[in-house]
Image (tube, grey):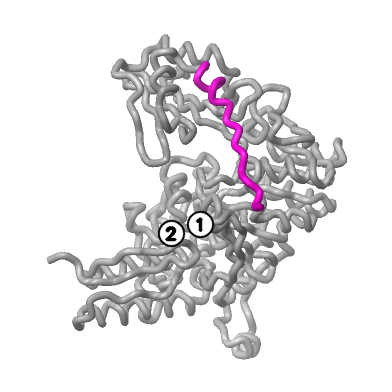
Amino acid sequence: MPEMKQIVDDLDAFLAALPPRISQPLAQDTEIRDLLEVVMDLGRPPEARFPYREVVLSPGEVTEEDIGFVTSRISPFSGDNRAGIERTLHRISAVRNRQGKVVGLTLRVGRAVFGTIRIIADLIQTGKGLLLLGRPGVGKTTMLREVARVLADDFKKRVVIVDTSNEIAGDGDIPHPAIGHARRMQVPAPTLQHAVMIEAVENHMPEVIVIDEIGTELEAQAARTIAERGVQLVATAHGNTLDNLILNPILADLVGGIESVTLGDEEARRRGTQKSILERKAPPTFDIVVEIQERDRVAVHPNVGEAVDAILRGKKVSPEARYIDEKGEMRRERAPVSHPAPGPWPIGGKGKPLRLLPYGVSRSRLEQAIRERRSPVSLEEDLEKADLLVTSKAHYRRKPPVVKEAEEKGLPIYVLKSNNTYQMRQFLSAISAAEVGPVEMALKEAEEAAQKVLGGEREVELSPQSSYIRRLQHQLAERYGLASSSSGQEPLRRVHIFQGAA
């Protein structure tokens, strides 16, 4: 029999932290076991959010007394405006006014789900470094927590969790039972995560280090240091796919780092490439990358070095698709997905200019660099119209709403080390070095399909593609005045092009 999932959510403790007029109607909801979070904003009715609906819990507006009721029953807020409930996995985040007063709360239900890692159990047994990627809310932290427990309890490893916001092991000094015998080190402030990572290795002799959300250059450097000391590293990072990581100079070191290399004429001819190309500059920090597409579906890159090298050469990379079927059995298959090389894939030839959204960088300097290089690039004002977000290191670290939205949409993000014309020229050179073959083929297929529909065919179905290429195909259909839609499950999701309503 397949192993069944067990869920521990401590909902009684969650409800006890809410004012009775809010908790009572929530407790009576027949779908309370699916509750995601409760939102309490001063002067607005409190809301409960479920996967597919939102519910107003009380017609009365949230008052200062309501917010005070909650804050008196939770731990103090840390530097990242997060708090918790003792011995639970629930997370409470504060919204403050300009004077620092709490005027809003987001109370997110934390659940320990046992049995979530069967889909990658064989990977964690290898002792290799494992990096989990995926959009927010897809279950990265839940899977990471279960990895820590299984390695500590089932495989008797010395596991240390670096728990920055107490999301993995819960609030309070006694960790949640969901991590088993793994040990937990709390982090005084998010800016100190990299220091605690090194301290964990130097002071506690772990065989495995578990970290949630590697997001800064210092943390990436600390991860490399840990891996070089022979400690197994299991972590999550910002980004939905391996492609996203390659585009991010701050985190690209996790998969070996990327550098622009100029080849001699003879070598360029031998390789059949441009003189300026992108190459991996070091061994990857993580041996395996797992892209979590859905809670029961992942794509696995078992050899990160080989995958990155192939992507940089514009070759097709087919990760292994794993999923849990209707009977609860784990299935594995080779996914026919092309991961395009990073950069302005639809550039030059028959492609369209790459559309950049600059955020937190000088638009005038970027325009100057584009003119100097005569790059086929256009600048946009709207995130929805952009193919790539360009921002500065400082803005990326602060995670403003536009950066978070881009990450959630899976939009590639390129981070400039500094806001000057030289860095912008380097950026334009790097994205121009990427080969465009796989994407050009996908766009050519979409263009031929559009011509067929214009010629009278009712509908044309395209080959399965990554989410980024599908977005380009939708845009191409729109330019022809046609309608389009996507169908199927990742990694077999594909675009259909057809005549829209008159």
Camera sees residue 416:
no
Looking at the image, the residue that sits furthest to the top is 65
- Residue 221: x, y in percent? 71, 49
Q: Is residue 427 left or right of residue 254?
A: left
Residue flagged by tag 1: what amino acid is it? Tyr
Instruction: Determine the secondary structure under disc 2.
Output: strand
Task: Using the rendered view, name the quadrant where residue 25 is placed.
Answer: top left
Of label 2 and label 1, which has the lower sequence position? 2
The magenta segment is 1-16
Q: Is residue 302 above or below residue 158?
A: below
Taking the magenta stretch, the answer to whether it contains residue 486 is no
Q: Which residue is mark 1?
A: 414
Q: Does the residue at mark 2 contact the one at mark 1 (Cβ under 8 Å)?
A: yes
Camera sees residue 61:
yes
Q: Residue at x 48, y 77 (%)?
A: 438
Taking the magenta stretch, the answer to whether it contains residue 5 is yes
Q: Which residue is mark 2?
A: 388
Q: Residue at x 67, y 22 (%)?
A: 172
Q: Is residue 231 left or right of residue 38?
A: right
Q: Is residue 202 above or below residue 410?
A: above
- Residue 305: x, y in percent? 69, 67
Of 277 and 314, the residue lying toward us: 314
